[in-house]
Image (spheres, grey):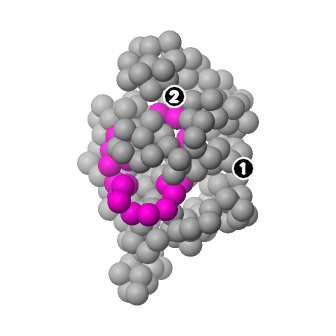
Amino acid sequence: MFQHSLRNASSPARIEDEARFLKSWVENPLRTGAVSPSGRHLARTMAAYIDRDMAGPVIELGPGTGPVTEAILKHGVPEERLILVEFNPDFCKLLRLRFPKATVVQGDAYGLRRTLHSVVTEPAAAVVSGLPLFTKPLPMRRALLDETFALMHRGAPFIQFTYATVPPIPKKGAGYTAKGSARIWWNLPPARVWVYRRDAETRA
């Protein structure tokens, strides 16, 4: 089973995923943004911010080969609730094999409403992102945040990781605030998770 093999960081599946990521990064470093999949400590930290009891789908942006997806499943979110938005067609094929009950959408996360207009039929419980946001100008990052908020329940989180020492979108802006996790030193390279939510006054 894939779920079992991912638990072993040195497993053949993990090694193959490292090779897939490296190939994708060499071909298009600005779109892939990383040379290897997220580590299990980072993936587990991201998944922990999801409220499993909140109704609606969980949307993952840029799942790659699925390490964060696997952590979300281990966190207790049913596979049927997952909507995986991935631009790379090879990764999409792999995700469909590994997570057959999830909805895999090949498309551009930076046009999220258009990409998911016929897929999302109820407010989402969370959006979890592995996108390399720093490769895009700040207005595009802010627009992505606005689009995710429009798809989610009020109070639901937009969960984003970064290797940088600063947040990928400013901590405070028009209608939202964000909090960062402690630095995850076990990840290579070390990373931090930022959780964005709409301000209380915009939830009313």
- Which amino acid type is marked by label 2? Ser
**Residue 198 position by quadrant:** bottom left
Residue type marked 1: Gly
Q: Quadrant of residue 202?
A: bottom left
Query: From what the image shows, is residue 79 above or below residue 19?
Result: below
Instruction: Tell me the crowding category of disc 1: few under 14, some 14 to 19, or many 20 or more residues within 10 angstroms, Cα based.
Output: many
Q: Quadrant of the C terminus?
A: bottom left
Q: Residue at x 49, y 62 (%)?
A: 56
Secondary element type, mark 1: loop
- Where's residue 11, x and y in %? 44, 14
Residue tagged 1? 107
* Residue 53 coordinates in the image, percent (x, y): 35, 60
Residue shown at 51%/57% (left/top)?
A: 57
As drawn, is 30 to the left or to the right of 77? right
Residue 101: % across, % down: 57, 40
- Tell me the residue at 42%/41% (across/down): 73
Q: Position of residue 9 (x, y in %)?
A: 40, 19
Q: Nearer the viewer, residue 47 or 170?
A: 47
**Residue matched to label 2:** 36
Mark 2, secondary structure of its residue: loop
Please give the range of residues in magenta. 42-67
Is residue 154 positioned above or below 195 on the image?
A: below
